[in-house]
Image (tube, rainbow, N blue to C red):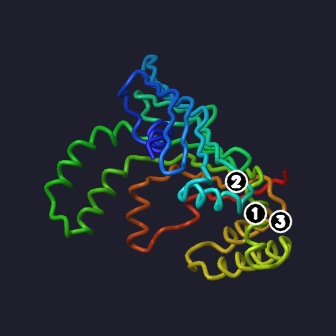
Amino acid sequence: SSVAQAYYQSAFLSPLDVYDSFAIRDILVEASGVHFSMDHFTAAMERSGSRITSTAELGSAMLIPDPSKPAGAQLAMGLGMLGYEQLELRMAANSIYDEDTGRAYTTGDNYIELTDGLRLEMGQDVAGYDAYLESLPDTMATLGAMDGSDEEAQMDVVAQLMAPLLINNISMRLVDLSILDRALEAGATTQGISKEELRVQAGAMLGMGLMAAPPEIPRPVLAQLSTALTNFINQGGTLTVDMTPPAPLSIGGMLVDIEAGTFDFNSLGLTFTSEAP
């Protein structure tokens, strides 16, 4: 969607100074029994010296079914299984790009939230954007002139483009705002079992799935992930995934190592934690 695209452009992708500001307000769309409304979506870029601050905010986007019409009735039934009559989405993104250092990082609020459902918070700190942006036009021209069937050669060019990008940190925080209980309730009703029985089943299936993980993934990392996910399923609260490499990690180098089968997962600096509500 345009909202998601703008979010990632503001918070996670190429930090270019491409506009001053824009705003979309008071949108209402009614189609086939589904109503969509958005009170405002705003975005801005502000330069101060070498620093470009990007912001974006979605105040409230709502999806409301009209059960009197076929499409609306279908949507209403799906939402009703999760205990919703309508959906409301909010979003904020804030990031800074420093042209002098080539570093782009999030600051303040960066989240997508489903009201009374879940909240996904994200953060990043990536260096090397100056070299990346400098080589981007030539790289795109090279890719455009290449034989599209030579995927290996294309991959080499992309890896070379991404090589200057160094990950200092990427994090994701999932906050349960009732979606877990709603999903378990719906699943339990469908299967004819209790919510707690389904919770136990989900934990067991999760454990079995992680046991089948590739041997390249360190077992301590898998054990930490298993514990965090199991606790999250059992108690809700917050699940945090944090990647802080011991040394800045080249995205291009990582792509090359993964392709060659020589990637060291310990270089990611992954940690998984859960917190009770």
Tell me how far mark 1 sits from mark 3, CA to CA: 10 Å
Count neighbours of disc 3 (C-alpha within 10 A) and say few if under 14, some if 14 to 19, many if 20 or more: some
Label 3 to label 2: alpha-carbon separation: 15 Å
> Which residue in the protein does label 1 denote?
228
In the picture of the structure, the residue carrying the numbered disc 2 is: 240
Residue assigned mark 3 = 234
Secondary structure, mark 2, is strand
- Residue at x 54%, y 50% (from the top left corner): 33
Q: Nearer the viewer, residue 91 or 12?
A: 91
> Which tag, 1 or 2, sits closer to the chain's start?
1
**78 left or right of 275 in image:** left
Looking at the image, residue 41 lies above or below residue 156: above
Question: Left or right: where does residue 205 sit relative to residue 33?
Answer: right
Q: Mark 1 or mark 3, which is nearer to you? A: 3
Q: Can you tell which quarter of the image residue 135 is in? A: top left
Q: Is residue 61 left or right of residue 151?
A: right
